[in-house]
Image: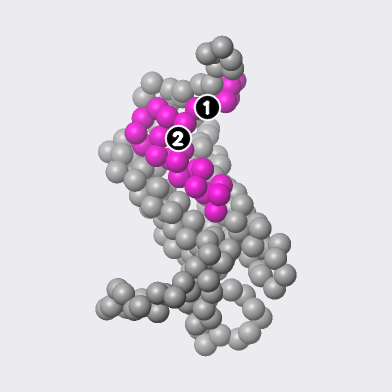
Amino acid sequence: MVVLNRIYTRTGDQGTTALATGERREKFDLRVSAFGTVDEANCAIGLARLHTAAEDPHLDAMLGRIQNDLFDLGAELATPDTGEKLSWEPLRIVGAQVDRIEREIDELNGGLEPLRSFVLPGGTPGAANLHLARTITRRAERMMVELARLPGEVVADPALRYMNRLSDFLFVASRHLNKRASGDVLWVPGQNR
């Protein structure tokens, strides 16, 4: 259980932050940047949910589960797997979470027409916010992949797969919302020449 009775601690005033293990890292450390960007993606999904709650309650429930998963992922990234025994069981993204998001992608995509052009970010307010969340998710994924390539840093495969699927989910979800309204905003190559 998390208990936060004091919001500021002053421990980060010198430019470091604590991981869940107690280890301190620079605030610009790639691991810290990765879980911070996962949090940013979660916030963008929260903005989208201001619209999806009314536009599509079923999709909104999916997004609620994803937001919870992203907190799990943030906890995983904040608790590096160093091989050392911890006094608690750290949260880790598991294959079942990846499987669920794949099923939900298939469900939403099943009602969509195949794409004949690239889609411009936009459409309904909910869809536009999902596109923003998608781009932030891609940035978080790139950071996680880069982190996983560094010596001594571990990012588990299910976490990487989850983030890859999440950007796909957000793309399909934005198309799903736009279908319910006026449709996708399509790219017209060279339109303004």
- Which numbered circle lies on residue 129? none
Residue 147: x and y, percent?
64, 62
Whole-number angstrom distance, CA of label 1 to CA of label 2: 10 Å
SS assignment at label 2: helix
Residue designated by label 2: 174
**Left or right relative to 146: residue 37:** left
Residue 115 falls inside the magenta stretch: yes
Crowding at dot 1, Cα within 10 Å, few <14 / some 14-19 / many 20+, comes out as some
Q: Is residue 1 above or below residue 178?
A: below
Span of residues in magenta:
114-140
**Left or right relative to 28: residue 148:** right
Task: Please name the residue shown 27% across and 78% down the image.
Answer: 5
Q: Nearer the viewer, mark 1 or mark 2?
A: 1
Dividing the picture into quadrants, the one containing residue 159 is: bottom right
Task: Please name the residue shown 33% across and 40% down the image.
Answer: 52
Q: Quadrant of the C terminus?
A: top right
User: Closest to the observer: 59 or 21?
Assistant: 21
Crowding at dot 2, Cα within 10 Å, few <14 / some 14-19 / many 20+, comes out as many
Dot 1 amino acid type: Val
Can residue 128 be seen in the rendering of this structure? yes
Q: Is residue 93 above or below residue 46?
A: below
**Left or right relative to 6: residue 24:** right
Residue 66 falls inside the magenta stretch: no
Residue designated by label 1: 119
SS assignment at label 1: strand
Residue that sits furthest to the front in the current view: 14
Dot 2 amino acid type: Ser
